[in-house]
Amino acid sequence: MSIFKRLRDMTVASVTHALDSMEDPVVMLNQYMRDMEVEIGQVEVAVARQVALEKKFRQQLDEAN
C-alpha cells in the first residue's frame, strides 16, 4: 500500500469521524423528512400530469375511431 493511499484513507476516516460526531440524528431525520415531503409533492405533480395526458390521449383515440 502506498503512503499516499494510506494518507488519503486516514484523512477520509478522520473527516468521516468528525462528521459523524457532529451529526444530531434527530436533526438529520427531520431534514430527511422535509426532503421527502418536497419529493412527494414533485411526484404528485408528475402523476397528475401523466393522468391528464392519459385522458387526453384516450379522448383522441376515441375521436379517431
Image: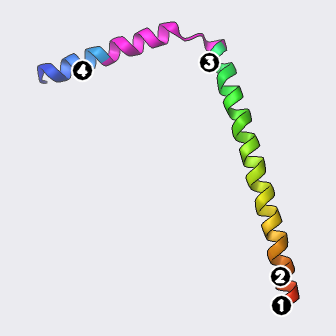
Residue at the far left: name it.
2
Other-residue count near label 4 (Cα within 10 Å), few / some / many at <14 / 14–19 / ≥20: few
The reply to whether the C-beta atoms of the residues labelled 1 and 2 are less than 8 Å apart is yes
Please tell me whether the stretch drawn in magenta is mainly helix, strand or loop: helix
Q: Which residue is mark 4?
A: 8
Amino acid type at circle 4 is Arg
Sequence-earlier tag: 2 or 4: 4
Quarter the C terminus occupies: bottom right
Other-residue count near label 3 (Cα within 10 Å), few / some / many at <14 / 14–19 / ≥20: few
Q: CA distance from mark 2 to mark 3?
A: 48 Å
Q: Which residue is mark 1?
A: 64
The relative height of residue 54 versus residue 44 in the rendered view (above or below) is below
Residue 42 versus residue 32: which sits nearer the camera?
42
Sequence-earlier tag: 3 or 4: 4
The relative height of residue 44 versus residue 21 in the rendered view (above or below) is below
| Residue 61 in picture, x, y percent from top left | 82, 84
Judge whether residue 19 is colored magenta.
Answer: yes
Amino acid type at circle 1 is Ala
Residue 28, label in figure: 3
Q: Which residue is mark 2?
A: 60
Amino acid type at circle 2 is Gln
Q: CA distance from mark 3 to mark 4?
A: 27 Å
Position of 5 with respect to 60 (left or right) is: left
Q: CA distance from mark 3 to mark 1?
A: 54 Å
Sequence-earlier tag: 2 or 3: 3
Q: Secondary structure at mark 4?
A: helix
Query: Between tags 2 and 3, which lies in front?
Result: 2
What's the magenta region? 12-26
